[in-house]
Amino acid sequence: MDRQLVVLLGPDYAGKSSVMAELSAALPGWQTLSTDSERVGAEHQLIARLRRNVVEDVLPELGKAYSAEFLASLLQTAVVHLRDQVERADPGTPLLVDSYYYKILAKCRLAGLKDHPLYGWWRAFPRPSAVIYLDVSPESAWRRSDGGRRLNSLEHYGESPEWFAFENYQTDLRKLMLEEIRGLPVTTIGEQPDAAGTADAVREVLAA
């Protein structure tokens, strides 16, 4: 792919959303792509609604009213939306994409779908030119989650958001994401004191 396509990746509560907001204003020459509600255009509000439906309706009933396959089918709408945005963007404009398909694929695997035909399709999407991985310790992520009170069931193991269930899940999530991006140019940014500091560190990497 003859364009600059950089993926911003990280575990839960790494601060990607806040960093994307900072960078959207600080990098006027770049286009930032995300499925966060505040970053989805008016013409794509279905994506934001589906994301809310997953959290509010599907996750509480996962394994009961809804299967892991059904969850993956809904999550792939976000993956395909980002792919569409990448392919429709001006070829001369560098892109910074939030997570791309990597985090969703890892979470689907942790939900029980160890392998699925969708994965092969996602892996055939336009290849990033680089990945910037925002690292954060499970301890810091736990604090940012308000001691587990803000967690959904795709951020921890088991039914209850306990510390060890969260720590084990985040450790496995990190391992799977890094496994998925193996072979790509990856720059890891260590934990920063705030979103502004992380955004500055990302800008340095992009300018290098």
Image: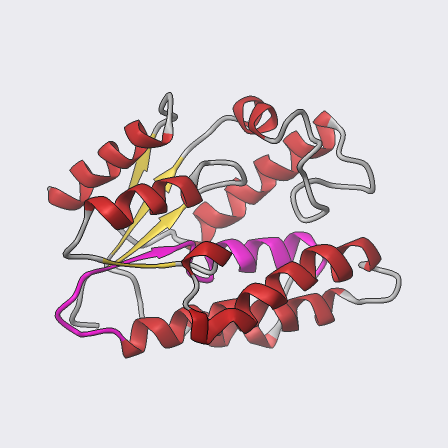
Image check: 63 left or right of 201?
right
Above or below, 198 against 93 in this view is: above
Image coordinates of residue 6 in percent, x first then y, are 27, 55
Position of residue 128 measured from the top left corner of the image (x, y, whole percent): 29, 61
Q: Position of residue 114 (x, y in %)?
A: 65, 61
Query: Is 206 situated above or below 191?
Result: below
Q: Quadrant of the C terminus?
A: top left
Describe the colour scheme in one phrase: secondary structure
State the residue at coordinates (68%, 33%). Answer: 166
Would you say residue 101 sits in the magenta stretch? Answer: yes
Left or right of 173 on screen, residue 208: left
Residue 138: x, y in percent? Answer: 56, 27
Residue 135 visible somewhere in the drawing: yes
Residue extent of the magenta highlight: 89-112
- Most extreme residue toward the right is 64
Tell whether 85 sits left or right of 147.
Answer: left
